[in-house]
Image (cartoon, helix red, strand yellow):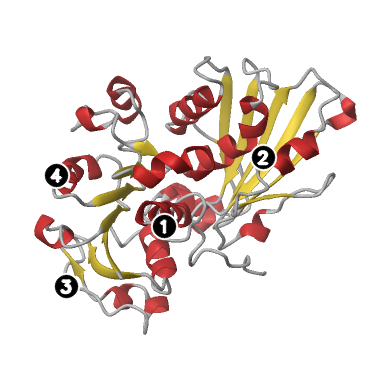
Amino acid sequence: MYKIGLVGGTGYTGAELIRLLVNHPQVKLHAITSRSEQGIAVADMFPSLRGFVDLCFTNPAIDTLAECDLVFFATPNGVAMKLVPELLREGIKVVDLAADFRLRDPAAWEQWYGCPHACPEILQQAVYGLPEVNRGLIKKAQLVANPGCYPTAVQLGFLPLIEQGLADINYLIADAKSGVSGAGRGAKVGSLLCEASENMAAYGVAGHRHLPEISQGLQQMAKGQPVGLTFVPHLTPMIRGIHATLYTRVMNKQIDLQALYEQRFVDEPFVDVLPQGEHPHTRSVKGTNTCRMAVHRPQNGEIVVILSAIDNLVKGAAGQAIQNMNIMLGIEEAQSLLVPGLMP
């Protein structure tokens, strides 16, 4: 039985990690931390966990976390990088769900996140935790940077075309919509029911923090070639879910796109390519670690459209983090994650 620590257990992502971990047969939650809620029972804050968790929130003491086999960080950006180096020195495996270790370039981190990186020497050690691309590296990693929610949906959607050199990588468009839970659990005017309900709006058009992460991943798929990506996120009046509509040029009309996608993901437990002509729904992946997608070539033209849907809190965060944990600890990758979506 592996001991698991969770730093930052009071947000939506932290709560989702706990929900998915409590029934995992090969791990046991050893510590759940929160500086602001120290001493409060986890089940008192999240009544849905009554009968499943008997821990109280504690301070993130290194001595306690060092008793774990693996520690998750579900903290705001900039927190993990101050604690992770000491855990790595103790030999503890780490999965960070924030952005602290996603970008390899510390100058890019400072540009997009507004502060110097606290441990730039560790950035090259971190493995980007998209299993469908980096499974072999994740297996040997001590530190995994869990991908963001938008980056997961976008990268998986473009992956088969870019890997095979079929997409015009100078013309990549990602039009993505997210549920309000992606904004976090903190009190914000834009997340209020009266503000978010019956409304949809784009944001971050000039540049969103996930843009350099997505570009970095797509460039890796393109064997180091620069990519031209336009990424526009939108906030939608739903709680969970991301739907990414992706566009690129594919000049070769002889390519069987359906076969290409089915073959690329045939052995991936958490990517479901729909039959030709179908469209994924965010509600079909609610509560699951599945990315459900479809590929279309409208009017048999040069523009290919890929539709990619995930639950932002699961495949976009906590579920993918557990998928990474399973790989790192040598546990069967899909353990505790193969569940059907919630309906309605």
Neighbor class of circle 1 (other Cα within 10 Å; few <14, some 14-19, many 20+) is many
Residue 7 in view in this figure:
no
Mark drawn on residue 264 = 2
Image spot of residue 64 (x, y percent): 13, 62
Q: Residue at x 55, y 51 (%)?
A: 179
Quadrant of residue 171 in the image? top right
- Mark 3–mark 4 Cα distance, whole angstroms, equals 28 Å
Q: Residue at x 53, y 41 (%)?
A: 152
Outermost residue to the bottom: 51
Neighbor class of circle 4 (other Cα within 10 Å; few <14, some 14-19, many 20+) is few
Which of the two discs, 3 and 4, sits closer to the camera?
Answer: 4
Residue 46 relative to residue 342: left or right: left
Q: Are marks 4 and 1 in contact (CB under 8 Å)?
A: no
- Mark 4–mark 2 Cα distance, whole angstroms, equals 38 Å
| Of the pair 315 and 115, the residue shown nearer to us | 315
Which residue is disc 1 drawn over?
326
What SS does tag 1 mark? helix
Which residue type does callout 4 highlight? Answer: Arg
Image spot of residue 325 (x, y percent): 38, 55
Mark drawn on residue 89 = 4
Q: Earlier in the sequence, mark 2 or mark 3?
A: 3
